[in-house]
Amino acid sequence: MTKRKGRKKRKRIINSIIILVIAACLIAFIITNNKYSNAKLLKTEETLIAKQSKLEEGFKVKGYSLETPNIILDPYNNSPLTALVLFETNNEVQVTVTVHGKDRLTTLTNKETKKTKKHYIEVLGLYPDTINKVTLEYAENDAVFRKDLEIKTGKLPDDFVIATNVKADKTKLDESFYFFSPASRGYTSAYDVNGDVRWYLSNNAVWRIKRLANGHLMTSTERLINPPYYMTGLYEIDMLGKIYNEYTILGGYHHDYYEMENGNILVASDDFNNIDGTVEDYIVEIDRNTGKVVKEFDLKDLLNMEDGQSENWTAYDWFHNNAVWYDKATNSITLSGRHQDAVINIDYKSGKLNWIIGNPTNWSKEYQKYFFKPVGNNFEWQWSQHAAMVTPEGYIFILDNGNNKSKDKDKYVAAENSYTRGVMYKIDTKKMTIEQIWQYGKERGSSFYSPYISDVDYLAENHYIVHSGGIVSVNGKPSNQPAGLSTGNIKLKSDTVELLNNKVVYELVLPTNYYRVEKMKIYTENDFSLGNGERLGELKKTDVTKTQFLGLDKAKKIDEEYKSHNVKFTKEEDRLVLTGRFQVKTDVKVILYRNMFSKVYNFRVNKKPYTALCIDVFSEDENENGLVISRYINKTGLYGKYSIYLDINGTLYNTGEVVDF
């Protein structure tokens, strides 16, 4: 009997617990739905990939002929100096397109790679604000069919950068364009041998732009992941601006990437969760097919963060990697640490340090064995370098910015006495010797001095590009600071030189700063095709400061004080974005409420004293009313609907908005 009473008692307790749980769920449901009932549900902003899929629905080829083709200017709303010409033919033929330029080297011709009845003809390299003459033709049964078109393009944006000086030995050049990625105002754009603009992207693509093995380009996304310039990842695109793949990378992307032989991408990234709070000291390899990180290299495991400090060294940006280069012959990765004046090489398989190029002053004793001993005449070390690469001959090719030319502050060389150069070193890893075998730029003096960014490119043996992209003058004198950190009467310049057998065959001067340059032909041996792009990879889970139970009853409705901050919440496919203007040191908390529990995210408004603002395209706007910030809460780990609250220095507001993940 006693056992039976015990079982009944336990059953009553269990039933009570079940009733309480159900009641709690009902209360949560009522409270949650009450909060959502009058709230505004944020609409998800379409991704560029989603937008382009809708655009392709209008790419009609049926019913159009060579005589009356369907002409779509800027088909993806991202590449204004391009067009698609669509039409059908009765039989399978190969169509040739010719975009008529001002002369032989600026006239572009391309032929479809295979015969087809449905034609999607890429028209690339149009002139802006011009009625461009374009010719289509094909041969069939010993007859040639031809159609001359006129395609009118729009004006360039008001802030577009026009060349101020061009020198070209056209007997030594071809129809390739010079592709520039911006560091200050400007666009990712291409200029021909006459210095005319022939292509650009209208979105905020930054950092390196380079052709992949499949003929596509790779550039950054337009979305920030962290200030001042860390992007969510990379786009694989074509010249029309169509995105084939978007790679979202856990730690984002900055400065450089390298396509490996297997198609995987080595990326200069960050680990924003590392305990030291450092940046630009992390390399990842992402799988080309999945976007997942398959290999990681943390430079803090290899180097002493305190060693070899340059003038721009800081505790959080101690290495400042600005180059990634894989060398198959040695199965190694070469990186460029601007803030240690060091080019380093690490073994791809083991991740261990192989060698260091740079002045060994102020480096710990344990690292001295990794440095080379200079041999030969006219040797100089590089300083605050960029764009380190390994040439086919095994030489190390570097853009030597030339900052200070010493680690001893008492021996610093002033900007007006400095110079930037491309330099090539020959190294012997057995004898640990280094020899300078080529340089260009020293003879140009301070007029060619770039204290930041810039590039070198290897085109062929004895055929190089040296790009001094960060020339800054302040009050008429050469500056030792990046454009974004300079004050006064500032003038910017980019000077790009192409050398063949030590003679200048091309030079282009632009009145702003550009990060890097690539010389490429605009057409590739790939035909255009329709199809959806893919989004690969994911963003990291955003850290929650704390989780709390209810506690939102004191929230105020939106008032004039709230409105003064210009707060805006935007729902992207994979994150919630907060933008607003706040005074520095303001404590801002975003609170996401769901089912009686709140997730609290702290975003203290700070502006770090950046010492190497490589690009200021995304500079945070600051005035007497505060600093405009953007902060992000990633979708990873969030499910369902959340009411959005905002706490500003202890004052809690109910925004009246809901986000649905």
Image (cartoon, rainbow, N blue to C red):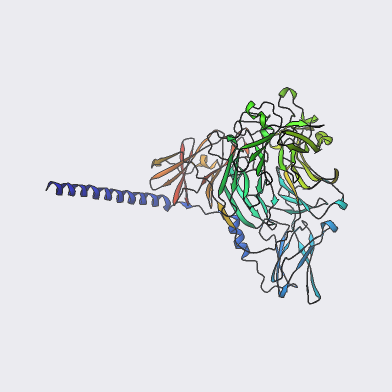
Residue at (64%, 54%) from the top-left corner?
236
Query: Could you say where residue 384 lies in the image, as x and y percent from the top left?
Result: 71, 34
Query: Could you say where residue 571 lies in the image, as x and y percent from the top left?
Result: 53, 50
Location of residue 267 by image quarter: top right
Q: Between residue 488 and residue 421, name the one nearer to us.
A: 421
Location of residue 598 by image quarter: top left
Number of numbered discs: 0
Location of residue 115 by image quarter: bottom right
Name above or below for residue 442 compared with residue 84.
Answer: above
| Residue 169 appears in the figure | yes
Is 56 positioned to the left or the right of 160 in the image? left
Query: Could you say where residue 108 lies in the image, as x and y percent from the top left?
Result: 79, 60
Name above or below for residue 623 compared with residue 78.
Answer: above
Considering every residue shown, the one lying at the far front of the view is: 430
Query: Could you say where residue 617 lies in the image, as x and y percent from the top left?
Result: 67, 43
Q: Between residue 469 and residue 259, name the one nearer to us.
A: 259
Is 271 positioned to the left or the right of 407 in the image? left
| Residue 616 appears in the figure | no
Q: Between residue 232 and residue 489, name the one nearer to us.
A: 232
Q: Between residue 93 and residue 335, name the one nearer to us.
A: 335
Residue at (50%, 52%) from the top-left corner?
42
Considering every residue shown, the one lying at the far top of the view is: 410
Is 500 positioned to the left or the right of 111 in the image? right
